[in-house]
Image: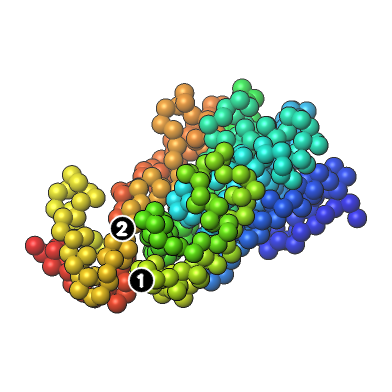
Amino acid sequence: MTDKVFRDPLYNYIAFDRKRDGWLIDLINCPEIQRLRRIHQLGVSNFTYPGADHTRFAHSLGVTHLMLLMLGHLERVSNAERIKNARQALLATALLHDVGHGPFSHLFEPCLGINHEQWSIAIIRDETTGVHRVLKNQGAYLPDHVADLINSENSSHPPWQRALMSSQLDVDRLDYLRRDSLFSGAGYGHFDWHRLLTTVQFDESETDLVWPAKTALAIEEYIFARYYMYQNVYLHKTTRGFEALLQAMWTRADVVRQEGGEIDANPALQRFWSVPMAAPGSLAVADYLRIEEFTVLEQIQRWTGHSDRGLADCARRFLNRDGFAMIEPPPPPNPLKVDDFGEWEPELHKLLTANGFQQPAMYCLADKVKGKYRQPYREEKEPENQSAVNTIRVVDGGKPVSIGQYLPRLKSVIAPPEDRVMYYVPKEIRTEATQLRDRLRKA
């Protein structure tokens, strides 16, 4: 048997040819990749959807599988030599694009002050890591090529290479939309992904990617799948509430630490907090990689007995899934200041204090979501600036046009919604907070 096979609930089998891609199997076996088994793909979404326990490891395998399929298709329909020359870098990028993620994926980045993309690049370039050694054995150029493709600010390689991995329609999105839909049980991630993979083609310049007009309806399906997943899964109010709770707890711990209090940090986090910032270069890669979800959960468990009442209470609430209730704020007194709700927050703080919450700022959590983050698909308005990275384009009359122009009915979906602000307070005061909100609405 020449294939290394993984059983996957989304694709049934994911197979890697040992003869052609044995180095890829070595890469999978590196500790830095195996660490992704201990990082949830959807942060704390399993608090809302109990089945959403899938990991960044499974997602990374799925993305690599799709990259194999897409490269195989492009080899068949275009300049095969060009595809073969970039094949190793693209497969490695697919597998390694999330290697820098911290605990609970995107959720924990504000808590630790990290950017997972920067850390992915640092891990790939660090000569002490297993992934660097495997890449270097395949070619001295390979670590830098892969790091360049992950770096969103780097444009040193042909646009089509970046577009396959990081664009408005890429193998990363194709996998996580369907995988997140499956494991959450939400059922919104259904679209003709195989058609999207097997109809992509190069444009006239042979440097960028487009789709034929016959694929337009499959693209429309994909955009709506993104829309439904954002509305129902990624921005679910219960999930957002637990995200806000975790971030508030971490902020309080940092305040206690900076004020000279003892936070009983475990060794991995003690090392992390001992440096002024968490950017690559200020903390050794090996120290960063020690911060995993079990590290954070063990720390939260410690805090349940902390002398700081607010920190201990929030730690207990998080571990016991005793979340906060969402309250919609009253309309802003001044429509031009959409984030200013007048007396709403001060009155909420008074209400919390009156109910025994000694640190009201920890229990009055504003969740501000910019409209652009709720937008399922964005495209560049100026045709001369459009590329596969920023716009999905189909060929109409021999020329590439944006999918928004080709299907005008998508304009309402493409337009960014208004910014949204929701508040989270302890469930114990939900009724009183709602009554307060209603009084302020009438005032």
Which quarter of the rendered picture does the N terminus lie within? bottom right
For marks 1 and 2 on the same chain, the one whose residue lies earlier in the sequence: 1
Which quarter of the rendered picture does the C terminus lie within? bottom left
Indicate which disc residue 366 carries: 2
Q: Of the residues tagged 1 and 2, which is closer to the observer? A: 1
Frontmost residue, 373 versus 77:
373
Looking at the image, can residue 334 be seen? yes
Q: Secondary structure at mark 1?
A: helix
- The residue drawn where x is 65% and y is 48% is 286
Residue 293 located left or right of residue 370: right
Indicate which disc residue 399 carries: none
436 w.r.t. 331: above or below: below
How crowded pointer 2 is (Cα within 10 Å; few <14, some 14-19, many 20+) is rated as many
Picture coordinates of residue 161, whole percent (x, y): 64, 33
**Residue at mark 1:** 309
Residue 412 located left or right of residue 434: right
Q: Amino acid at mark 2?
A: Ala
- The residue drawn where x is 57% and y is 35% is 151
Picture coordinates of residue 25, whole percent (x, y): 79, 49
432 w.r.t. 340: above or below: below
- The residue drawn where x is 47% and y is 26% is 385
Frontmost residue, 203 versus 123:
123
Picture coordinates of residue 98, whole percent (x, y): 61, 48
Residue 63 located left or right of residue 321: right
Frontmost residue, 232 versus 352:
352
Q: Amino acid at mark 1?
A: Arg
